[in-house]
Image (cartoon, helix red, strand yellow):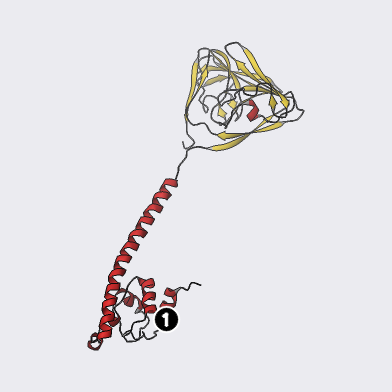
């Protein structure tokens, strides 16, 4: 069983107890003092007077003044003084080593703490997108671990379909869900900036949760001349040009779609003018773009801006 020697000794000294006769020093007391203060007093250097409250800090920092009588010692005391002086030298060396070791441990701990402090600008989140029965133009709003049809839609109504538009051929590529996580084209990619049709064959709404990182940095989506499907790479809702920074040229058009009203077209007339108005795009929503000339939709984005 371990006993807190320092606490016991401190309690005794602070109660004003008399110090023991150290003409024959107590090894236990010397050892206790070493543990408490790291200081080894010479036996003849300790006063025989009672220790009073408030003197404990003085006792720990330096020996009390000696009287002439206390300086006179016999042969046995002199031998004890010699041994104690040798122990004081050893104690100083040990104390210096202990301080050095403690300093090295603190430095190592600080270095380890610094090394373990890793700052990341990644913003991870999730987006719920609702797909009503029938067709919806949607997008993948986040950069997931795997951005394929099979990973993003592991469980839909059987025979639900995803369609991606090919601007070069003017046709659609499709993948059909066969149940139990099986798709006819499971590796079809759906990355932020693209858009697709999803045909939900269920009779009720289906909510799909997208999980991943927010795209950041310089984000570029190529927009060919003519028709293409596109979306904002940033999961943000707002006016398509004013907020989402779609580059619009004179007579460029945007077409949104929903299963009730079908297509709604918007035409850019220059300046800040759109007819009938500038379209608002929701998070997870895709749309058709008709460009008069090819261009890039480039946006610099950071979650800290």
Q: Residue furthest top?
A: 169
- Residue 136 appears in which quarter of the rendering? top right
Q: Residue at x 47, y 34 (%)?
A: 302
Horizontal side of residue 88 vs 263, given as left or right: left
- Which of the 4 quarters of the picture holds residue 132? top right
- Is 120 rendered above or below residue 287? below
Q: Position of residue 249 (x, y in %)?
A: 50, 16
Label 1 secondary element: helix
Residue drawn 32% across the image and 66% down it: 94
Q: Would residue 280 appear left or right of 293 to someone viewing this image?
A: right
Residue 189 percent coordinates (x, y): 59, 23
In this view, the residue in front, 299 or 251, is: 299
Q: Residue at x 61, y 17 (%)?
A: 165
Q: Work out whether 159 lies above or below 104.
A: above
Judge whether residue 112 can be spotted in this image.
yes
Q: Is residue 29 above or below residue 160?
A: below
Q: Which of the pair 146/39 is nearer the observer? A: 39
Q: Dot 1 surroundings within 10 Å: few (below 14), some, or many (20 or more)?
A: few
Q: Residue lying farthest bottom? A: 69
Residue topped by disc 1: 12
| Residue 162 image point, x, y percent | 67, 22
């Amino acid at each position: 069983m371990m006993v807190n020697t320092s606490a016991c000794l401190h309690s005794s000294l602070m109660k004003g107890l008399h110090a023991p006769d150290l003409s024959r020093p107590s090894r236990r007391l010397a050892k206790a003092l070493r543990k408490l203060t790291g200081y080894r007093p010479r036996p003849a250097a300790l006063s025989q007077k009672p220790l009073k409250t408030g003197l404990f800090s003085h006792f720990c920092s330096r020996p009390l003044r000696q009287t002439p009588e206390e300086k006179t010692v016999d042969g046995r005391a002199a031998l004890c003084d010699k041994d104690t002086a040798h122990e004081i030298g050893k104690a100083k060396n040990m104390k210096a080593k202990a301080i050095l070791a403690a300093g090295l441990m603190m430095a190592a701990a600080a270095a380890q703490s610094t090394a373990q402090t890793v700052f990341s600008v990644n913003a991870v989140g999730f987006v719920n997108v609702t797909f009503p029965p029938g067709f919806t133009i949607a997008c993948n709003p986040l950069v997931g671990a795997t951005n394929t049809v099979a990973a993003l839609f592991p469980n839909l109504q059987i025979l639900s379909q995803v369609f991606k538009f090919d601007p070069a051929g003017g046709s659609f590529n499709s993948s059909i869900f066969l149940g139990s996580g099986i798709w006819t084209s499971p590796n079809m990619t759906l990355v932020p900036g693209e858009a697709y049709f999803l045909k939900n064959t269920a009779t009720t709404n289906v909510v799909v949760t997208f999980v991943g990182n927010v795209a950041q940095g310089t984000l570029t989506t190529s927009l060919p001349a003519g028709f293409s499907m596109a979306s904002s790479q940033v999961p943000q809702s707002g006016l398509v040009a004013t907020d989402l920074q779609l580059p619009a040229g004179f007579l460029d058009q945007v077409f949104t779609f929903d299963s009730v009203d079908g297509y709604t077209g918007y035409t850019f007339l220059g300046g800040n003018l759109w007819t009938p108005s500038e379209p608002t795009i929701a998070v997870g929503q895709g749309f058709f773009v008709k460009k008069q000339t090819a261009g890039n939709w480039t946006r610099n984005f950071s979650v800290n801006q």
